[in-house]
Image: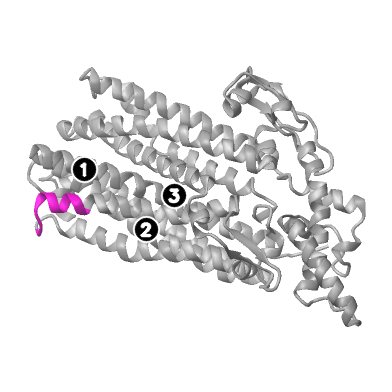
Amino acid sequence: MVENAVLDPSRLQFALTALYHFLFVPLTLGLTVIIAIMETIYVKTGKEIYKDMARFWGKLFGINFAVGVATGLTMEFQFGTNWSYYSHFVGDIFGAPLAIEALVAFFLESTLVGLMFFGWDRMGRKTHLVITWLTALGTNLSALWILVANGWMQYPVGSVLNPQTVRHEVMNFADVVLSPVAQAKFLHTVSGGYVFGAMFVLGISAWYLLKGRDLEFARKSFTVAAIFGFFASLSVVLFGHESGIHVNEHQPGKMAAIEAHYDGVDGCIDFKLFAWPSYKSSIDFTENDSWVSIPCGTSLINYYKPKIVQANGERILGAKQVVEQNIPRVKNGIVADEALQIISGKKVLQNSEDQARALEAAKVDFDKYKQDWGYGQLVKAVIPVDRSIASATEEEIRQAAELTIPKDIPSLFWAFRIMVDLGVWFILLFAWASFSVIKRSVGRSILLSRLALWSIPLPLVAIECGWFVAEHGRQPWAIDGVLPTFLAVSGITVAEVWFTLIAIITLYTGFLIVELYLMFKYARLGPSALKTGRYSLENSRSIREV
């Protein structure tokens, strides 16, 4: 049995690093597009207030962008420090999109951001507008390559396991980039960023309206955010649904955990809104108490009709069925591993003729079962380290198959529903805000303004829940169906992991404090921070000190 004491702290370290980093990324994605829209209106109309809007929200974008870049650096180094076998095993595939992302983020994107900030008085309106839109495009391209890499981890395509090197290598890079899972994940993620950017502008603008300050600036900012946010919130649901379809098709264990399905079902499948799923162990799947459900909701979401038919291949698998399906894959993986040992030269017979015959047979077996090699590696988690996986008993093979169901079903179940419920809330709130724009009543409803203000952090909650579902729901895999997480970790000490974990938390918390301080400072000042002489606080002591 593989016992790796650094696995859990390494996972915790990477999870916290990623979650911290993604506190800043969505706002960068959303604000760039909103700023570009505001500047477009300025160029079209010539009204200075839209230029002020673009410049002011650009200040807040700049603060967030700097902190986001700083927090993202650590993540890429962790693949080499904490996940060295992962980097060795799939470096040819995973390294390419990361390298492209680094080029986009640190050269293209950073250059464009600098031109956008310092080019207002150095280039014409239309030229600067082009730079602003290119900045928005650059931030999205940066996100694209990260999400291509992550999408490949969820659904590995365009690569093959080389038995000579025992590494996954690229066969078709276009398949990696154009994977439907990666593209749906990209569109869903950037749409979430757009929602956060819109909610950020909407909420702060609503605060100005509540304070009765800079009302024209606040109303116009509110208008842009409301309309953009409404369409962005609809796109989040659309692309999130597309991602869910892919999960149901390619990651049935994750879907079983998300929906707390323990037994496979067909026909009319209810969507559980509120329930208390229970999970005692990987062997004992127990039922859940469903309090509120939408009749036939899950079958409608996954197959667009109230009742699904197993004979047509329409079926929501439960955890038990996923395990039963994976038992043969574990057995096939064991055969593939035995063949790989011979092909790679790790297992050599004394008789050369026997070795030649064994090599030919091994090539046949490997070609037949190589797609299940990773499932065979799961056996290492349930047998002693001094035993070969080929010696696994039927019970041990079953235990390995049971690992393919994420352990913490209640947390996945509720994280998914928090994300979905908040998505519905965003649509309703932006619809109300957009209606107030159409009725020319922006600022008249105190309740709407307060709800917009209080909702500023909620997109982050939804986004972090989404990442938790995506990453925790992929377990036990570092690469789904290919490489178990416990084999991907580096051979470092527990003390080293905890030291760096504490250092990262301390450093990132410092970054977060600085970000919040600057954001609150400039948000309170509002457009007065531009020092144009047109806004309410420009004669106050606070603005003179900025």
Distance from the alpha carbon under mark 2 to that under mark 1: 20 Å
Identify the disc placed on residue 526.
1
Viewer-nearest residue: 291 or 207 = 291
Viewer-nearest residue: 513 or 353 = 353
Q: Is label 2 in contact with label 3 (beta carbons under 8 Å)?
A: no
Start-end of magenta stretch: 122-131
Give, as a three-letter code, the residue at label 3: Leu
Distance from the alpha carbon under mark 3 to that under mark 1: 22 Å
x and y percentages locating residue 406 in the rendered image = 70, 45
Q: Residue at x 40, y 51 (%)?
A: 25
User: Per the image, is 124 magenta?
Assistant: yes
Q: Is residue 85 left or right of residue 152?
A: right
Q: Is residue 93 left or right of residue 223?
A: right
Distance from the alpha carbon under mark 2 to that under mark 3: 10 Å
Mark 2 and mark 3 lie on one chain; the one further toward the N terminus is 3
**Quarter of the rendering containing residue 300:** top right
Identify the disc placed on residue 23.
3
Q: Is residue 213 above or below residue 67?
A: above
Q: Is residue 463 above or below residue 212?
A: below
Q: Residues within 10 Å of mark 3 (few under 14, many from 20)?
A: many
Q: Is residue 220 left or right of residue 487?
A: left
Q: Residue at x 84, y 54 (%)?
A: 331
Q: Is residue 381 above or below residue 243?
A: below
Mark 2 and mark 1 lie on one chain; the one further toward the N terminus is 2
Give, as a three-letter code, the residue at label 2: Val
- Residue occupied by mark 2: 67
> Does dot 3 land on a helix, a strand or a loop?
loop
x and y percentages locating residue 491 in the rendered image = 68, 72
